[in-house]
Image (cartoon, helix red, strand yellow):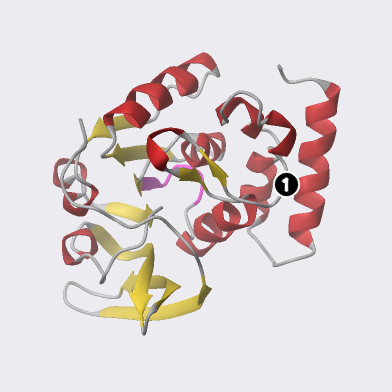
Amino acid sequence: MGNTDLYIGQRRMMVQQLLQKYPYDAQVLEAMNVVPRHLFLEKGMEHLAYEDKPLPIAAGQTISQPSTVALQISLSGIKRGGKVLEIGTGCGYQTAVLEQMGTRVYSVERQRELYMAAQKSLARMGYDRALLFWSDGHKGLQQFTPFKAIIVACCAQEIPQELLLQLEIGGRLVVPVEENGQQVMAVVERISENEFNRTTHGKCSFVPMLEGVNR
């Protein structure tokens, strides 16, 4: 189940299909064309790895579909060398894409099972520069602020104010949020110390953002 010609071809096809859906950032798609998504999945699901659909992972969570990963990273505006905070490491796939892009990744996961598994998967594939933390995502990582971008891979009931304050000026928070009974993809840019600009970018579907940690 390694990086065979079959999976290389499937990744290339996935990227071509993504190009037809939305003008995603070219650096994001370049990274997704390299990262072996099939190696982050549960055994027996590798054949679905490069279809544009979310899939179940451990601890009752999901890995976001490729178009969602591409959209969130593109909306964040993060570039090579930029410092990004990821809330919801999950299986580590998006973490690997961000690292492949050359960003400095700090990632938080509340599920201990996923935190441990992601560490092993990322190290095995050589994506071991990212700093992973088993912690409550609502709190972010104050000790490493400010961040150029914060990407939240779960749906918040409202914009997490503590995360906004961990952005640098000009930085962006990308977060799914509940709005009028549905989930929408929100982007909040920090304009100044006390000024923020919010935009929305369509409907989405994520697991809920929960407080605390799960042992």
**Which residue: 51% across, 55% down?**
73
Name the chief secondary structure element in magenta. Answer: loop
Q: Is residue 24 above or below residue 60?
A: below
In this rendering, would 75 be left or right of 43? left
Q: Residue furthest bottom?
A: 180
Can you identify the residue that label 1 sits on?
A: 51
Q: Is the residue marked by circle 1 packed among few (<14), some (14-19), or many (20+) residues within 10 Å?
A: some
Magenta span includes 199: no
What x and y, as percent, mark residue 108?
Answer: 29, 40
Q: Give 68 or 54, whichever is nearer the viewer.
A: 54
Q: Give 92 or 180, whichever is nearer the viewer.
A: 180
Q: Is residue 35 visible?
A: no
Rendering quarter of residue 40:
top right
**Which residue: 49% across, 63% down?**
205
In this rendering, would 118 be left or right of 209? right
Q: Secondary structure at mark 1?
A: loop
Q: How many marks?
A: 1
**Which residue: 30% across, 64% down?**
156
Q: Which residues are magenta?
A: 79-84
What x and y, as percent, mark residue 195?
Answer: 22, 79
Q: Quadrant of the C terminus?
A: top left
Q: Quadrant of the N terminus?
A: top right
What x and y, as percent, mark residue 99?
Answer: 49, 35
- Amino acid at pointer 1: Glu
What x and y, as percent, mark residue 53?
Answer: 64, 51
